[in-house]
Amino acid sequence: MPSAIASAAPSATASAAPSAIASAAPPATPPDAKASDVQEAPGSAPQTASPSCPSTLRVEKGDSFESITNRCYGSRTYQDLLVSHNHHERKGLRAGETLKIPPFETLAREHVAAKWASEMSAVAASYAHFRRAEPEIDRQLRSQKPGMGPYRPTAATKLELDAAASALRPVVEHLRAAGVRTKKFAQAVQAFEQLASGEGSFSTDYATEDIHQCFSYGISALK
């Protein structure tokens, strides 16, 4: 997968170029909604960083962990976290069964070592700001020709991107001081900074997907 940010100026936040950038956040839905009832139209993530799905979701024919995590959390890359939360196997998802869809922070805390659990509130806050910015980023990038293209943040999106970087930056610094490899979280911070700057070129094919991967892989690295 090509990098989402190819020609933006380097940042001191990360030592490596960021991975790429996925789909817009769907609006919140009422409790006990069916998976097929959840629309994929853009919307804003709540301040609490809860997923844009009900807390329990009835599986419909054709659903998979991949499609559900993409719909509820913005990317399929979180599917292993949701599988584990439900004590399920990835295969064998059956129509009619019920899945628990926890807030992003709950997913994160369940998959990191206890000593890093307190860091997950900041990670979740960064994720929430990112999800509010994501629809506009996705709209601009995906409206362009395949390949690389410019991104110009609106004032509101820039505020969210700056807030996402500010929330995640102390996590990177804390983990780095503790001798923990922070490459993925650092790449997410760098991506936020570069998008907020409005400079450089970004992937129009993958939009924000690799930022989601930075969150997912960063969490997985803290076991």
Image: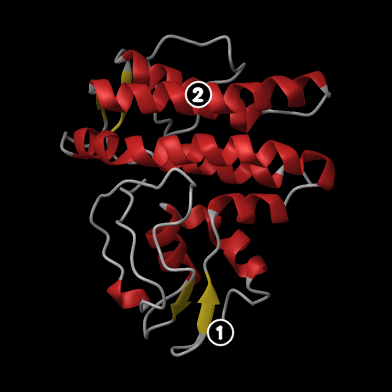
Q: Residue at x 40, y 64 (%)?
A: 53
> In screen coordinates, is 188 left or right of 88?
left
Circle 1 — which element?
Answer: loop
When the figure is inspected, residue 120 is found, relative to residue 200, above or below; the finding is below
- Residue 149 on image: x %, y %: 24, 25
When the figure is inspected, residue 143 is found, relative to residue 194, above or below; the finding is below
**Amino acid type at image mark 1:** Gly
- Residue 68 on image: x %, y %: 43, 67
Task: Confirm whether residue 1 shows in the render.
Answer: no
**Amino acid type at image mark 2:** Ala
Task: Identify the mark nearer the N-term, 2 or 1.
Answer: 1
When the figure is inspected, residue 59 is found, relative to residue 171, above or below; the finding is below
Q: Nearer the viewer, residue 219 or 168?
A: 168
Estimate how packed mark 1 is, as few (under 14), some (14 to 19) or many (20 or more) residues with alpha carbons within 10 Å: few
Q: Residue at x 71, y 56 (%)?
A: 110
Q: Residue at x 31, y 76 (%)?
A: 36
> In screen coordinates, is 109 left or right of 209?
right
Circle 2 — which element?
Answer: helix
Which residue is under mark 1? 92
- Residue 19 on image: x %, y %: 49, 32
When the figure is inspected, residue 5 is found, relative to residue 213, above or below; the finding is above
Report which quarter residue 158 is drawn in. Answer: top left
Residue 165 — which label? 2
Q: Residue at x 41, y 52 (%)?
A: 74
